[in-house]
Amino acid sequence: MAQYLKDEVHEALLAAALEVFALKGFRSASMAEIASAARVSTGNIYRYFENKSALYAAVVPNTFVTTLQRLLRQRVEAARGVGDLRRLEPTAPYRLLSEEVLAFCLANRLRVVVLLSSPEGTPHERFAEELVQFLVSSATSHFHARPSRPTHFALEELYRNYVATLGRTLRHFEQERDIRQAVEALSRYHLTGLAALFEP
């Protein structure tokens, strides 16, 4: 019985930490806020986790980050050689991998929010910017483009907005249907604008 209660507190702390990190960001979150959300004393946290960094590592482990990175790379790779992504059939590899990425993000909604919106002070604080640079590089390669410095700057800003909006969407909505609709609208707008940006 005692072991069950211990596991229950541990799980409550993980859930509370994830919610507080997603809401306030890692740097601004306090152990006292996490304890309050988990309904335990602040001192009790330290029986389970040495410090806030150890708690973060438990809720956003490196294995999660590498899995997300792998899925994103596979999705981009599936777009190679495709002229217009908007015209692909639902069974095309790019569409299937896009669904896999979205399903993974839905299943790990708050973890993705932390990575995209508020990882400052964590080992993953450059995740969003590295994702932006990866997407910029992939876009220019996809369109066989060598953009001018102003166009490259605009492309970086567009992708920073895109990534930030994905993070805000996952934070703002909790229902899968709402998230899917918002992501679909954002992606449709993005792909149309991207194609226009690289038109001769």
Image (cartoon, rainbow, N blue to C red):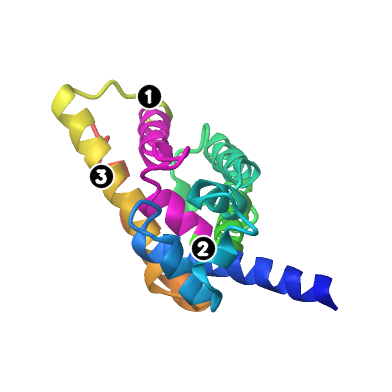
**As displayed, is residue 136 above or below residue 180?**
above
Q: Position of residue 170 (x, y in %)?
A: 43, 65
Name the residue tied to disc 2. Answer: 18
Closer-to-camera residue (34/111) = 34
Closer-to-camera residue (95/63) = 63
Front of the two marks 2 and 1: 2
Q: Quadrant of the N terminus?
A: bottom right
Verify whether residue 179 appears in magenta: no
Task: Give the prevailing secondary structure in the magenta stretch.
Answer: helix
> Cα distance, mark 2 to mark 1?
40 Å
Q: Is residue 31 visible?
A: yes
Give me the residue at 53% from left, 73% from top.
41
Verify whether residue 124 appears in magenta: yes
The image quarter containing residue 145 is top left
Q: Are the residues tagged 1 and 3 within 8 Å (C-beta)?
A: no
Q: Which mark is residue 144?
A: 1
Which amino acid is tagged 2? Leu
How many residues crowd mark 1 within 10 Å: few (<14), some (14–19), many (20+)? Answer: few
Q: Mark 1 or mark 2, which is nearer the start of the sequence?
A: 2
Q: Quadrant of the C terminus?
A: top left
The image quarter containing residue 10 is bottom right
Closer-to-camera residue (55/51) = 51
Magenta residues, start to end: 111-140
Residue 87 placement, left or right of 197 = right
Name the residue tied to disc 3. Answer: 158
Give me the residue at 40% from left, 40% from top.
125
Which type of secondary structure does the marked residue at label 3 adopt?
helix
Which type of secondary structure does the marked residue at label 1 adopt?
loop
